[in-house]
Amino acid sequence: MQDIDWLKENVEFTGELFLGHLRYGTFGRNKIENLHPVLRFNNWMTKNLALAGNFNLTNVDELFEKLIDLGQHPVETTDTLTVLEKIGHFLDEENEDLYRKFKNLGYAKKDISQLIADNLDIQKILAKACSYWDGGYVMAGMVGHGDAFVIRDPSGIRPAFYYHDNEVAVVTSERPVIQTAFNISEESVKEIKPGYALIIKKNGSVSEVLCHQPNEKKACSFERIYFSRGTDADIYKERKNLGKLLCPSILKAIDYDIENSVFSYIPNTAAVAFYGMMKEMDVFCSKIKKDKILESQGKLTPELLDKILSLTPRMEKVAVKDIKLRTFITQDKQRDDLVTHVYDITYGIVRRGVDNLVVIDDSIVRGTTLKQSIIRILDRLGPVRIVIASSAPQIRYPDCYGIDMAKLNDFIAFNAAIELLKDTHQENIINEVYTKSKAQENLPKEEIINHVKDIYRPFTADQISEKIAQLVTSKEVKTNVRIVYQTIEDLHEACPNHLGDWYFTGNYPTPGGNKVVNQAFINYIEGRNTRAY
């Protein structure tokens, strides 16, 4: 175990450069060929490439055509293969340029291999490769001789953090894992700038270099709400603020009746927002107690004071989730089978026919789990009213940059808007959006406008929330159900440095987003159960 050289020669996965990637099935498949890293083999050490990433590109067809223009014959049109071949092409080109250069200088072929390894310009390769990419991405790669890189999209959509010192350089999608592994402060961990690449050369030098001119930063807010670890110092504060900012809407939904309300949360990822909500509910109770004490001056008795001071928000663990089952990231065909088995409830803590039951969730995407599982089991407790509060706004549009919320008819907010159009005899809007989307189908992505916004335009957010409440309440549920969503304004207040909100607003940070959302609507109308990118 002390002989490092022997270990590197004789034991697998022992070395100085590592590339790992968590890959689970969302829209994709769980097969070995779908796993990252993906590899591009070559007999030349400096032409071997391994690539892993957190990304989706919206213009794969366009990039595929560019590969053909370069003289390649790719066997697939997936964004993973397209990216691999794109970087690989310019890696080959750089190798050939260096080979000719050193051969003309009179170096022997055997010596040229090492000279290429020492002089390979990773920045130039990446800058050429990513010039036409449209999407959100953090891609990590290794070249066969020992150079490594991580490149981030110019809008900063996907997260990337790094740390390096004299002994180690490490890059991850989340900051806390680096802090925990190396026992360092959050200030020691840096964020790769949008449009930049972190390049780690075999000789140990580390540099952050520009590869694509940065756009306006639109870091993904859904990472902050749900996907990223809540143990990050900033994310923890942001999620607490999301819960705090929901309080006015929640209080309105329960008619300000704190005394007869029970507060809880689902799933565990909503726990931090729940803490923020409860802290703000405490503040609300303190104001009531203060007002009542001031009103009672001159007639305040110990008994009355005890009664006033006893007003506190009641919080309980009502719904218990099986931690083995994550329905959000499960493939479509498995999800419906899972949702009825996800939750159990705690009996005896809600006063039947007396209490409201408020449950905060981090997001409401499809509404399937609410309808098939959560609301049904909460209804068994017999509350006067069930209020489901989402710390995220209404998810109305597809995400095409890495989270894989891909199809419009999956979104309960979209289905609610369609139902409202039918209820109000405005079906013509559906046809108009389809016609406009079809008319743009073959335009360059830079000329496409998001016409799906017109589906939501006739209605307020509250009207859509009310319709969602109807859609997620099955016929056998007796309790009145209300749905409360975060507002876009409060989301931006809670997460001021992560303003990427396209799944809520339809304001996509790249032209490809508008192309994807219109294609998603065309797929919906034409009955094609597939994603639009």
Image: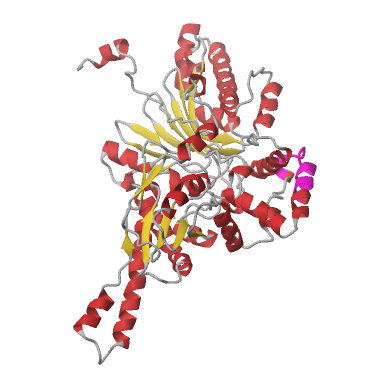
Apparent side of residue 231 relative to residue 211 in the rendered image (left or right): left
From this viewpoint, is residue 150 visible?
A: yes
210, above or below 97, in the image: below
Estimate the x, y position of residue 263 in percent, counting from the top left: 37, 60
Looking at this view, is 91 or 311 the one in front? 311
- Magenta span has 457? no
Looking at this view, is 283 or 52 the one in front? 283
Apparent side of residue 351 relative to residue 384 in the rendered image (left or right): left
User: Magenta-highlighted stretch: main secondary structure?
Assistant: helix
Q: Residue furthest bottom?
A: 298
Q: Tell me where residue 162 sits by quadrant.
A: top left
For the C terminus, give its image quadrant.
top right
**Residue at left offset 75%, top offset 58%:** 425
Estimate the x, y position of residue 513 in percent, counting from the top left: 64, 43
**Residue at left offset 32%, top offset 44%:** 188
Q: Which residues are magenta?
A: 433-446
**Residue at left offset 59%, top offset 61%:** 461
Apparent side of residue 330 relative to residue 204 in the rendered image (left or right): right
Apparent side of residue 167 relative to residue 211 in the rendered image (left or right): left
Looking at this view, is 502 or 265 the one in front? 265
For the N terminus, give its image quadrant.
top left
147, above or below 344, in the image: above
From this viewpoint, is residue 138 visible?
A: no
Estimate the x, y position of residue 528 in percent, counting from the top left: 69, 35
Estimate the x, y position of residue 159 in percent, counting from the top left: 46, 42
